Image: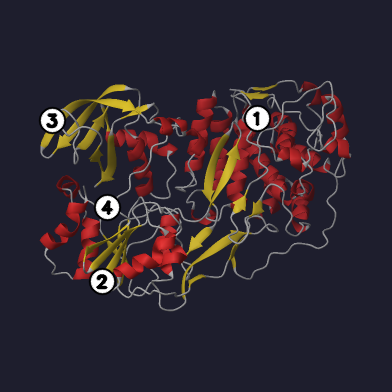
Amino acid sequence: MAAKVALHGMASRSGSFFRCVAVAAMVALPAVAIAQLSPPRPSPSGGHDIPQAAAADGAETAGRNPPKLAIATDHRFDNGSGIAIHGLDGTQIENLVTLGKVWGFLKYYDPTVTSGRLQWDYALFRVLPAILRAPDRASANAALVKWIDALGPVPRCSPCAHLDPHDLQSSPDLDWIADARLLGETLSRKLQWIRDQRQVGTQFYVTLAPKVGYPVFGHEPSYDHIPFPDSGFQLLALFRYWNIIEYWYPDRDVIGEDWDKVLATFIPRLVLARDSTGYQLQAMALIARVHDTHASLRSSLDTRPPAGHCHLPVSLRFVQQQAVVTAVDGAPPNPSALQTGDVITKLGGRPIPALVREWAPYYAGSNEAARLRDIATYMTRGPCGEVGLAVRRDDHALSLEVARVPLPKDHLAMGDYLPIAFHDLPGPAFRLLSPEVAYLKLSSASARQAGDYVRQAAGTAGMIIDARNYPSEFMVFALGSLLVDRPTPFARFTAGDLSNPGAFHWAPPLVLEPKAPHYRGKVVILVDEVTQSQAEYTAMAFRAAPGALVVGSTTAGADGNASRVELPGGLFTIISGVGVFYPDRRPTQRVGIVPDVVVEPTIAAIRAGRDPVLEEALRLILGPKTPISRIEEMYRGQLH
């Protein structure tokens, strides 16, 4: 079947390669203003808009030194790209893959683009018609050459950027620009020249945060007013995100996907999405292919399946590969309602494994433990009213009709957001479980009180630090420095390179400097799939204490400061913005904080109200011969 492409309002410019430009102040706005052809109005830069045709004509010959007036006036696509694609053939997909890679390369390497003198998103829409019409690869490459030539010559750099091999963790993956079979001799030569003439530290669409070095994408408009479907803006979303991962994602080497193939796969999936919901679902599926627990489509949690404004008033957790009720909200249990320890085998008549397979592609997870954690959190969401459940309770099979209840209003306001259940003890942040054991949970710990915690724990045999949650405050140095007796490296970061997009360099190790009061007992850190990001980083630091042990199961595997990424349609996601490693350069992304002692929950333990992870920590501190009755009495009374 022939591919179908409609180019609305662009027929008269189909053969032109022209360039309208926008000042930095305009591009930095979260949403681009609606274009007005007449009369002129003041622009953010202090100039005036001019009629659209004049803006286009003026930009066509502007080259690399366009008139100042044209710099401030690119509103050509403020109301939509004008491109509607109804089908794509194999040649078009191949050519769009090349376009996406070339567009992204120029975005971060071409000096005119990196200076911010172009509205580079709109430049994509200007060249896109020619690429879609190209009958073969050579014709598409010729169109790209013409497009690049219209930018004007790239001058020799002075000074020139160079890739410093010192502490280089990974190099840019740019071998493809030398592939003349793919690009043709002329296009390949031009791209290599642009790479070799790159300037030092000059970027417009990305900066690096001071000290830590995570990328900040401050000049990426969200275009929240654009009506969808819009094939051009949907393709822009793919190209923007794909190239951010290609050049600025510090964990690119552990994605576990052929990133070029992902680009080719998602071109038709995103471009041909028929409505806003379909577009958002395909964006979720794309983001999930990065395998980063940080990286869900945060703006669209209400769209991620299963969708609905109600849910069952219970907490679920996958334990021993089964969906288990771990807590019940509201009234006391009764035979017709769910109870703690129930195993849900079917929901709405469908087996749980089938639902997981259907929903999993839309859930971003660094590992399976984190993905199942999030699916369990959302899996009972759906339409309000009763839903049929097949349940296994002890040795009995039950069929229940249980009513979904409305989500809390504050959760609805956050896009049907549901909080992840923590697995720490209820009650105060710090307590003595016995005269021999102190317990601290990070979910309510205070950095200002770190010294008080240690003083209260003085003389105990061990301190249990529960990281099966998310820290309420940043505790790494406030408490970590009280757990070590000498300067102790505990982590090191990698960060991107503005002069060499796609390169990442090692930073020096981060060090805990010992401070008083010093805790002298054994330190045991508890972790599981809820332990993510700052909680993982905190666990890394505390396990550097002499003799410290980590107990529990696989963590979420998403560490490092998060960087926000805006996508067309008012959408946004985040990525892990810095690479986080142990001092010996062992990775944490996707791997998580690997426990020294692996202990996982069991269905039997949940039914009995026991915490095997905490029990093992107590056993490690008190000794292996400590009776289980003594261990249980230390914490069982604190579970209520």
Give the residue pinned by disc 3. Answer: 335
Q: Earlier in the sequence, mark 1 or mark 3?
A: 1
Coloring basis for residues: secondary structure
Circle 1 or circle 3, nearest the eye? 3
| Mark 3 vs mark 2, CA separation in Å | 45 Å
- Element class at badge 1: helix
- Element class at badge 2: loop
Q: Earlier in the sequence, mark 1 or mark 4?
A: 1
CB of mark 3 within 8 Å of CB of mark 4? no
Left or right, residue 188 beside residue 626 = right
Give the residue pinned by disc 2. Answer: 460
The residue at 70%/53% (across/down) is 178
Q: Dot 4: within a 10 Å radius of its alpha carbon, few (fewer than 14), some, or many (20 or more) residues?
A: many
Q: Dot 2: within a 10 Å radius of its alpha carbon, few (fewer than 14), some, or many (20 or more) residues?
A: some
The quadrant in which residue 304 appears is: top left
Q: Earlier in the sequence, mark 2 or mark 4?
A: 4
Left or right, residue 61 beside residue 384 = right
Give the residue pinned by disc 4. Answer: 425
| Mark 2 vs mark 1, CA separation in Å | 64 Å
Hey, what amino acid is under mark 3?
Pro
